Image (cartoon, grey):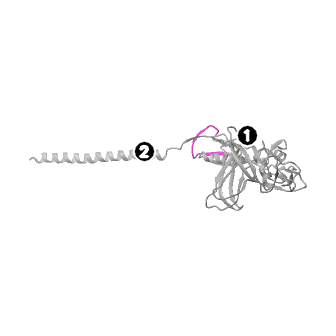
Amino acid sequence: MDINTDNKQQNKKSFKFFGRIALILFIGMSLYLFVSAIILVFLTKPGREIMIPNVTGKRFVDVYNSLVRKNLVPEIKFYDVYDIDNGIILNQYPEHGKIVYEGEKIKLTVSRSETYIPVPNLIGTKLPFALNKLKKLHYNDRSYAIGTGVISYLQTEKYAESVIIEQSPDAGEEISPDRKINLLVSAGKTETEMRMPDLSGQSIDLCLDLLLAKGLTINEEIILIDSSAKSGMIESQAPKPDEIIQPGDLVKLKVYYFPQKDRPYTSFERIIYTILSDEHEGLYDGYVDDNRSKRICFSKKMKSGGKIDFVFKRRGNADISITNNKKEIIEEINIKPDDFN
C-alpha cells in the first residue's frame, strides 16, 4: 500500500473521531445552557400579582394585618401633626390600583399626633348613654371616639341599676384619643327578691355584664338568621320579665346570629369551643379583648366535653381566651377584620 494513501486514511479517521467529540461537546454544552436557562427563569420568576389597596385615610393598626396577608411589606415613616388623629395613613406608595408582585414594599406616611382631649364626666350617667357619649366627643371643632376598658359592676343601694359610679381616668384629665376609660357600674341594690329584667329585643353585649353582676349563669341558644339586621339581639328569655330570680339561677337566652362571609371592622361574632376530655371541671370564662374593651362574654361552670357557645360584638381585631378557674388559659382564638379583599 502507498504510504501517502495510508496517511490520508489515518487523517480521515482522526478527523471523524475528533468531529464526533466536538459534536458531543456541542450537544452537551447546548443541553447545559438550555437547562441553566430554564432554572434561571424558574428561580427569577416573580410572585403572583397583587393590586395595591387604598389605605390612605385609614388607621395603620387596622390595615397592617390585611397588608401582610397580601404578602406586602409595610414600611412606615411618621409625620408630626396636631389636627389629625394619631396613626392615620396620610400617603401611600405605590398608589391605589397599582399592580405589583408579592413581597413588594408599600411605603406609608403615618400621622403622629400630640392631640389630647379632656375626659368627660360620666358619673351618674346610665351606661348606654355614657357609651354613646364617648363615641361622639367634640373638641376643638373635631369629633373623637374613645373606647372603654374594663367595665365592672357593683351591688349598691346608692345608685340605680346601670348607673356609672366611678371612672378612670377622672373627668377633666387630658388623655390621647387612643386611651380607654374604665368604668364601675351599679348593678342595683341588693334585694332579697331580685326580679328578672326584660331583655327581649336588646343587644346581648349590653345585657351580659349586668346579668353576670347579679350572679346569674347564662346559657345562650344561638338562632341563625339570614340578615345582619338583628344579629346579636335577644329573641326571648327564661325566666320571663319580672319573675323572681336568685344568684346562681340559670338564665336561658335565645340570641340571633348572622354568620357573615366577610368580616367588617365591627360585627357580631360566634365562638364555639368543646372542652377537651383531659380538662377538669371548673368555672370556664371567655374573655374578649378588642379595640372596644377587655371583658367577659361567657362564664359558666362546666365539665370536660361541654360546649362553650356564645355571641359577642367585635370592634377591630379581637383576641379571645378561654380560661378555667380564672387562671389557666386552655384556648386562644384570634379574629381579624377583612378590611381589604
In this picture, which residue range is highlighted in magenta?
Answer: 95-107
The circle drawn on residue 230 is 1
Asked if 100 appears above or below 326 in the picture, the reply is: above
Question: Does the rendering let one see residue 224?
Answer: yes
Residue sticking out furthest to the right: 158
Q: Amino acid at mark 1?
A: Lys
> Could you classify mark 2 by the number of other residues whose Cα lies within 10 Å: few (under 14), some (14-19), or many (20 or more)?
few
Q: State which quadrant residue 203 falls in.
A: top right
* Rendered view: 312 above or below 285: above
Question: Is any part of residue 89 visible from this angle?
Answer: no
Q: Is residue 201 left or right of residue 51?
A: right
Per the image, is 103 magenta?
yes
| Residue 244 within the segment the image draws in magenta | no
Image-based side of 104 in relation to 247, left or right? left
In percent of width and height, residue 161 lies at 86, 51
Report how far apart the C-alphas of labels 2 and 1 lie in the structure.
58 Å
x%, y% of residue 113?
A: 77, 48
Residue 38 numbered tag: 2
**Quadrant of res 54:** top right
> Measured along the vertical axis of the image, is residue 293 above or below residue 141?
below
Q: Quadrant location of the C terminus?
A: top right
Using the image as rendered, state which of residue 102 and residue 24 is in the foreground: 102
**Residue 326, image x and y in percent?**
72, 61
